[in-house]
Image (spheres, helix red, strand yellow):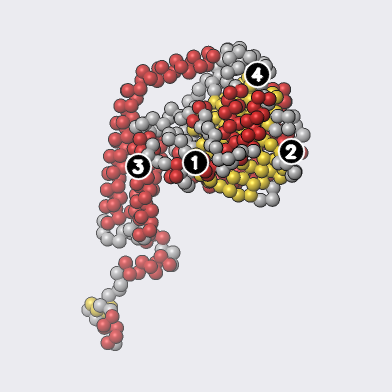
Amino acid sequence: MAGATDSTPMAAGRAVPPPPEAAAPRLLLLGGGAELWRPVARGGGWATAAALLLLLASHLSVLLLRRLRLRRRLRPADAVSSSSAAAAAAVVTADSAPGSAAGMDGLVTEGDLRELVGNLGVAAREPEREGWQQVVAKGNDDVSYRVWCDKPMEGPPRYLSVTTYERCSTELLRDFYMDNEYRMEWDNTVIKHEQLQFDENSGIEIGRTIKKFPLLTPREYILAWRVWEGNDKSFYCLVKECEHPVAPRQRKFVRVQLLRSGWCIRKIPGRDACRITVLHHEDNGMNIEMAKLAFAKGIWNYICKMNSALRRYPQRNISSISILTMQRLTKKFPQALETDVDANHHPQGNTRANVVPSHFARTSSRQQPGKKSSRATIASGLLLIGSIVCLSRGRSNLGAQLAMAFFLKKAFKQDKGSSSQRSISRADVTEPRHLE
């Protein structure tokens, strides 16, 4: 058999079997999963793993040293912040029984409402022309949703959204949004909500909410809010973070230190529908890029779930504490602001409003140069270990290796701190994209 002699090596009159590398494709097709872990060349894949493990060890040691130095440097500042928190808690009187007014008047003011009205007016114009970037635009027969993102120089982004609900009144939508007891039934991220205090004179209420996030410590929100009603059955609400003496910090929760959120519910003329416009700014301690990605990929499913809960809400027939309190505390919308509302909903020209008020532009104290949270460090380490495992599989194709290289670059790039974030322009705020 001359043909066989030409194509197959011979040893002692017998054909030598093909090397394992040549048989690999057949084993893979036949389901040989163990073959995936065999390196191409002897020691090649595991040498890569050893090198990357060495990089990981050096990376973590540098982060540990930085963290120790930072703790020594910030010990006096920590003492000052603790005293500041105690002073802030003292502003709200220890007499925290429902109806107590002391210390609550300045938490949510009509000045805050004026700023909110001006910022919500962006949605009536063209947000893209004012520096906002559209993230999601989807809809169906019951609900439509559009949301834009604006990235400050530091800290997490702000979101501006417009949601339209068909066959829904403004009163029903207001009650649905403010019913914290019902939210615990349909929103599985809300573990607990409790009322802490309210003041009938100012219309301000304070509450505590616990939310859970996958693989993260539950977040604790101490919030103050206030609701206004307009003559046309429109409603405004402004929510701000605060402190309260009956809700001391607990180690098992992460206290959210920045949440500024406001909305307006208005009827759509000529239709059996209403629209809610929301401006939301929150720093819940999550990695910013991870939060952006989670928001962009999951918000539409959340809106659909919310719409389903809204359709079931009229059959509930239970008067919750949240709604009874809200109905007692709701104030009339100030007549002095009606002109601002008309100007925002009927804009003339392309004059840009002041869309970055003080309380929405405030950045979180978490975003300090050179400071990186332990969770971010752990996330980078897990990402690196996953990359090591994938790269150690000697049969990984070029595309997978390039993807792992990209993830490794992102993991180490996060250590540069906020100095690199300042160079990011608004045009760079794209997917991937820190509930509520």
Lower position in the chain sequence, tag 4 or tag 2? 2
In the image, residue 39 sits, relative to residue 90, either above or below, namely below
Residue on which disc 3 sits: 413
Label drawn at residue 131:
1
Task: Kindly report the distance in space between the C-alpha atoms of the residues bearing marks 1 and 3.
Answer: 26 Å
| Closer to the camera in the image, 257 or 119 | 119
Residue on which disc 4 sits: 202
Amino acid type, mark 2: Ser
Q: Are marks 3 and 4 in contact (CB under 8 Å)?
A: no
What residue is at 61 percent from the left and 15 percent from the top? 96
What residue is at 52 percent from the left and 27 percent from the top? 359
Lower position in the chain sequence, tag 3 or tag 4? 4
Lower position in the chain sequence, tag 2 or tag 3? 2
Lower position in the chain sequence, tag 1 or tag 4? 1
Indicate the quadrant containing the C terminus: top left, top right, bottom left or bottom right. Answer: top right
Task: Kindly report the distance in space between the C-alpha atoms of the residues bearing marks 2 and 3.
Answer: 48 Å
Give x and y (percent) for residue 78: 40, 20
Give x and y (percent) for residue 386: 38, 48
Report helix, strand or loop for mark 3: helix
Crowd tier of the residue under label 4, counting other residues whose Cα lies within 10 Å: few below 14, some 14–19, many 20 or above: some
